[in-house]
Amino acid sequence: MTHTEIDYSKLRPTDWLPTSVKEMKALGWESVDVVIFSGDAYVDHPAFGAAVIGRTLQAAGYKVAIVPQPNWQDDLRDFRKFGVPRLFFGISPGAMDSMVNHYTANRRRRSDDAYTPGGRHGARPDYPTIVYSKILRELYPDIPIVAGGIEASLRRFSHYDYWQDMLRPSIICDADIDMILYGMGEKSVIDLARRLSSGEKIGDITDLPQSVVLRPMEEMPRQTDDANIVLSSFETCLADKRSQALNFKHIEQQSNRLDGGVTLWQASGRRVVRANPMLPAMTQGEIDASFDLPYTRLPHPRYRGKNIPAYEMIRHSVNLHRGCFGGCAFCTISAHQGKFIASRSKESILREARQVSRMPDFKGYISDLGGPSANMYAMGGRDKEVCRRCLRPSCLHPKPCPNLNTDHRPLLDIYRAVDALPGVKKSFIGSGVRYDLSMHRTGREDVDRANRRYNEELIREHVSGRLKVAPEHTSDNVLSLMRKPSFALFHEFKRLFDETNKRAGMRQQLIPYFISSHPGCHAADMAELAAETKALNFHLEQVQDFTPTPMTLATEIYYTGYHPYTGEQVFTATSQEQKLEQRKFFFWYDAAYRADIIRTLRRIGRPDLISRLFGDRPPHAGGRRN
């Protein structure tokens, strides 16, 4: 059964947030406090940001309506239908950045959109935050407009825009918005709603934690002090890429502080962007409260008869925690969620797993018990005072922090408890597993023994035939820039995977994920990657050309040419020709690429790899083996 066949007859229209005036009146409302405009279809599920914010406000007593994927090209009736909200308009551009959603790494327009009914493209504009806010400001010039989500959060300071190939100022300078609520917004949106309800004006609310506002230049401190960091201005960054790189170092460090960090300031034009400190990670009680809200866990009935691909991926999954302390150079998770883990209680997880097990189409298999990184549940620093002083963006690189608790026993307990529920045959782990975390030897025998047991149980009990892991590269130099462990550890994990499968009489596959054209990666590194993965008998399928996205270390290196932490220059493949040359090495087994690859190997002085890749016989033309 797909969700196109869901029987909505047992549910009432009032079980969802209202998407129409008719649904609003069915709730007995004549008006609303907040209207949220979402770039995604409305799926009432904790994996969809607009639903989370809407349900959070509703639970606090506010009347909330949601307008999913409004038509911005017609008479704008979608922007008018709820009229003036009592408090503010909210913009949630989408669970996925609009430009990543719309364009490939080659800047080619995609033909589908996983967050839209039927997967059709064109249901949202590029940069919904900018487009939606300009319409709302023209229609309702005096009503506060607040933006959140990935798009605004990761563009809260000057940032390189890969799709326009230029440095842009904070999105608050380009969009007609009064405030950005960056990161995970449940706590800050409630604080804002309460202050507006009490009569404060949006322009007077300048100190809200985890918010960004645009202020007069005279409010900026003259210099950095214990409570403030004054970043280089947007204009300075335009003229000097080193300044942009150094800005990023401060932004990343402050985004990953246990205590929320300090206030950051960046002048832009005649005004200054003020970013207030990030809130600490949610407590267990707070994150439980968010996940325990009365979600239907279903798409709104307006989509009856249509599939929403992103929903299909997570409909039978359960998220265990938020945050990621991996700090990968190309990843935006810690910039948005922070590096400190907020873990749900066992009871909350089991409540949701029982909900999944009662779904009419559930066949007994939980598709994922995961998180941003699948196996960071209940982990963090043992001594919080050490964490409070720490500015490291990664707890795992260059090596795991000695203060880090890597005990996987709480996670094993969750797996076993979920699998013991009536109706659950097996739970799988579909999220990415950090094998450098589960294989790290702490020197504590009880922890190391438990972690060995975790790896074995994961492989034996929780793999649906294929386990996806992300070594990302084979070159130690590139991996160091990525903030990833040596590829030698992947070899070790693969041996464990193969041995565990052999003992259990299984023939499961290990599916590694790799990136080409990452900063620091040369064509020779990709050639070695091809040769090494061939020797491991992989025909790669989980591959990607590096795509620069705002607020990542790798993007700053790509744009500026400098490493923000060392100031050293770093080579990056930036032209389409360079990127294509690197990407071809993923597909050395395809006869169509053989001549080009051989020419490249000769040009870069690595003819020795020709025989390692091709031998004396023509390469296999396609397919995959593992």
Image (cartoon, rainbow, N blue to C red):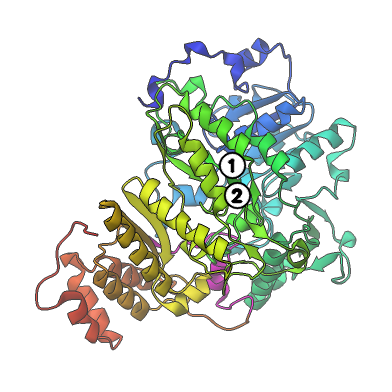
The residue most toward the front is 445
Q: Which mark is residue 151?
A: 2
The residue most toward the bottom is 605
Please name the residue shown 46% across and 49% down the image. Answer: 431
Residue 327 horizontal/vertical position (percent):
58, 64
Could you give the CA–CA distance between mark 1 and mark 2, rounded to whole angstroms?
A: 6 Å
Mark 1 crowd level (few <14, some 14–19, many ≥20, 10 Å Cα): many
| Image quadrant where residue 122 sits | top left
Pointers 1 and 2 in contact (CB under 8 A)? yes
SS state under label 1 = loop
Give the residues drawn in magenta, as a range: 544-565
- In the image, taking residue 371 as reference, residue 387 lies left or right, namely right
Reading the image, the residue beneath label 1 is 93
Q: Is residue 382 visible?
A: yes
**Is 190 located above or below residue 610 in the figure?**
above
Please name the residue shown 79% across and 30% down the image. Answer: 87
